[in-house]
Image (spheres, helix red, strand yellow):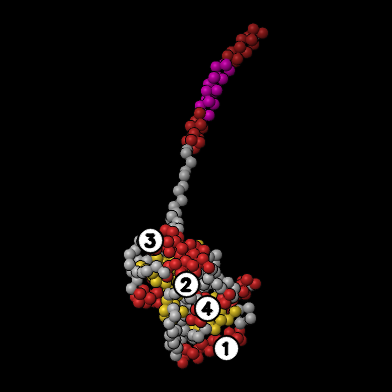
């Protein structure tokens, strides 16, 4: 009996020994299969994404591009936000000395014409420009004349005068003192910058309210800009630019502006094969459609004008 039990125990042990290699092999096979499935994931190379960006053009590059064009060159510029930094009170804006020096250098180069196309009226523009030579287009291009010449008389109908007087009466009754009011000969500009610094929501609400009130006068033009709403009889900057280009016989045109009101002139300059440059700001960092490129604020404009003077003097 004891012998039989020992024999049976020995047989079971041998069977287990025979089965263990098969179990180990099967287990190893399962592990191998798992490793085969996961190996491609572990060895896949990382995906490299290339960010496609347009190469940034520098003020010097824009200057060289314009200097390569032959013939007479017209350099036209807005004033506020382009030549002079934007300030809360427009009457305190000034053109920096380095910018004025660059403009004088350009004006002294044969074959170069300067033009200043602005929303300011003639008196305000002349105070800003002083003795800088060049064409003036004031009232958003309503009046065009050479510096030093008499300012043309604007053409305003009796209906337009009455509508503007009515709107000015509405301003006095509806808007708080924080909205700075600037009356011009043919228009009124409402400056919301100071109010926006204190209460952006209130500034936005009153801005839209004034816009709706002004839109009720068919004879008046309504234009909005950088925290400014202007209402009245206004010109068109693109038309003024092309008029000056024709009067000077310019074969190459450049215009730099910083606001919505400048976009037509920017597009007109670029469309004529010249340079339509947008001056970036924190309020409006993106370039409009049709612009040839951008400049970084009034300092970027100053660098561009200085580079232009260098390049055009040696072409």
Inspect this view and state whether residue 80 appears: yes
Mark closest to the chain's N terminus, 4 or 3:
4
Picture quarter containing residue 92?
bottom right
For mark 2, what is the residue? 78
Quadrant of the frame with the C terminus: bottom left
Q: Marks 1/4: CA distance?
A: 28 Å
Q: Which residue is mark 3?
A: 314
Question: What label sits on residue 264 in the rendered view?
Answer: none
Mark 2, mark 4: which one is toward the viewer? 4
What crowding class fits label 4: few (fewer than 14 Cα within 10 Å), some (14-19), or many (20 or more)? few
Q: Please, what is the dominant secondary structure of the magenta stretch?
A: helix
Say whether disc 2 or disc 1 marks the residue closer to the N-terminus. 2
Q: Earlier in the sequence, mark 3 or mark 2?
A: 2
At a point 55% along the width and 72% down the height, the residue shown is: 94
Mark 1 falls on what kind of element? helix
Which residue does the image show at 47% across and 74% down from the upper left?
132
- Was residue 23 drawn as part of the magenta stretch in this picture? yes
Task: Choose mark 1 or mark 3, whichever is in front.
Answer: 3
Q: Position of residue 60 (x, y in %)?
A: 44, 59
Task: Identify the magenta region.
Answer: 15-31
Seen at 39% across and 63% down, the residue is 312
If you read the primary sequence from the N terminus, does the residue marked by circle 1 or circle 3 appear first? 1
Which residue bears the numbered disc 1?
169
């Amino acid at each position: 009996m004891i012998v039989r039990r020992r024999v049976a125990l020995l047989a079971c042990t041998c069977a287990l020994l025979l089965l263990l290699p098969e179990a180990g092999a099967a287990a190893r096979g399962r592990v191998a299969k798992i490793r085969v499935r996961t190996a491609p994931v572990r060895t896949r190379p990382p995906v490299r994404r290339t960010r496609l960006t347009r190469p940034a053009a520098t003020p010097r590059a824009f200057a060289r591009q314009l200097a390569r064009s032959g013939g007479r060159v017209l350099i036209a510029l807005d004033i506020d936000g382009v030549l002079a930094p934007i300030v809360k009170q427009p009457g305190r804006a000034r053109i920096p000395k380095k910018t004025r020096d660059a403009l004088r250098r350009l004006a002294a180069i044969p074959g170069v014409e300067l033009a200043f196309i602005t929303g300011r009226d003639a008196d305000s523009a002349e105070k800003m420009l002083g003795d800088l030579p060049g064409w003036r287009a004031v009232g958003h291009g309503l009046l065009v004349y050479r510096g030093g010449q008499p300012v043309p008389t604007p053409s305003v109908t009796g209906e337009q005068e009455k509508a503007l007087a009515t709107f000015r009466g509405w301003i006095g009754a509806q808007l708080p003192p924080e909205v700075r009011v600037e009356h011009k000969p043919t228009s009124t500009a409402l400056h919301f910058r100071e109010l926006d610094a204190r209460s952006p929501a209130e500034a936005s609400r009153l801005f839209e309210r004034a816009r709706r009130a002004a839109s009720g006068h068919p004879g008046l033009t309504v234009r909005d800009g950088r925290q400014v709403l202007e209402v009245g009889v206004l010109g068109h900057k693109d038309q003024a630019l092309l008029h000056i280009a024709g009067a000077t016989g310019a074969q190459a045109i450049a215009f730099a502006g910083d606001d919505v009101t400048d976009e037509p002139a920017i597009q007109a300059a670029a469309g004529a094969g010249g340079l339509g440059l947008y001056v970036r700001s924190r309020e409006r960092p993106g370039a409009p459609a049709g612009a040839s490129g951008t400049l970084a604020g009034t300092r970027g404009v100053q660098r561009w004008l200085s580079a232009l003077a260098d390049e055009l003097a040696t072409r």
